[in-house]
Image (tube, rainbow, N blue to C red):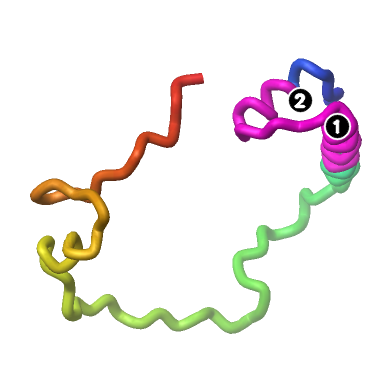
Amino acid sequence: MQLDKQLISRLEKLARLQLSEAEREKLTGDLQRILDMVDKLQELDTGGILPLVYLNDENGSLRPDEVDRHLTTKEALQNAPKHDSRFFRVPKVIDSI
């Protein structure tokens, strides 16, 4: 996969970045090296290898879920800068792209 200026520009917009031309060129090089490494990994034959589930032979023991003290709606909202009767009010951070 080759990266072009249009793709870098789209990624910049999606990530809400404002990069200089030098930063764009460095990012393009870095991303291309990452993609080249992934392509190199695709060459490996992993047919007879089982998927790794755990890093060691010991399975982690999970504790049972237990209901403990929980906050009431009033307690949860008491320090919130903005809220209505049941919900936190936050500013919109995602615009349509």
Amino acid found under the numbered disc labelled 1? Thr
Amino acid found under the numbered disc labelled 2? Ile
Tell me, yes or no, if residue 42 can be seen here. no
For the record, the magenta segment spans 9-36
Residue 25 within the magenta-colored segment of the rendering = yes
The answer to which of marks 1 and 2 sits earlier in the sequence is: 2
Q: Residues within 10 Å of mark 1 (few under 14, many from 20)?
A: some
Residue 18 within the magenta-colored segment of the rendering = yes
Dot 1 and dot 2 residues touching (CB under 8 Å): yes
Whether 80 is drawn above or below 39: the answer is below
Q: Secondary structure at mark 2?
A: helix
The picture places residue 55, in percent across and down from the top left corner, at: 67, 73
Which of the 4 quarters of the picture holds residue 22? Answer: top right
Tell me, yes or no, if residue 20 can be seen here. yes
- Quick check: 20 left or right of 11? right
The structure residue drawn at horizontal position 19% and vertical position 80%, both measured from the top left corner, is 68
| Mark carried by residue 46 | none
Whether 43 is drawn above or below 60: the answer is above
Residue under label 1, please give it.
28
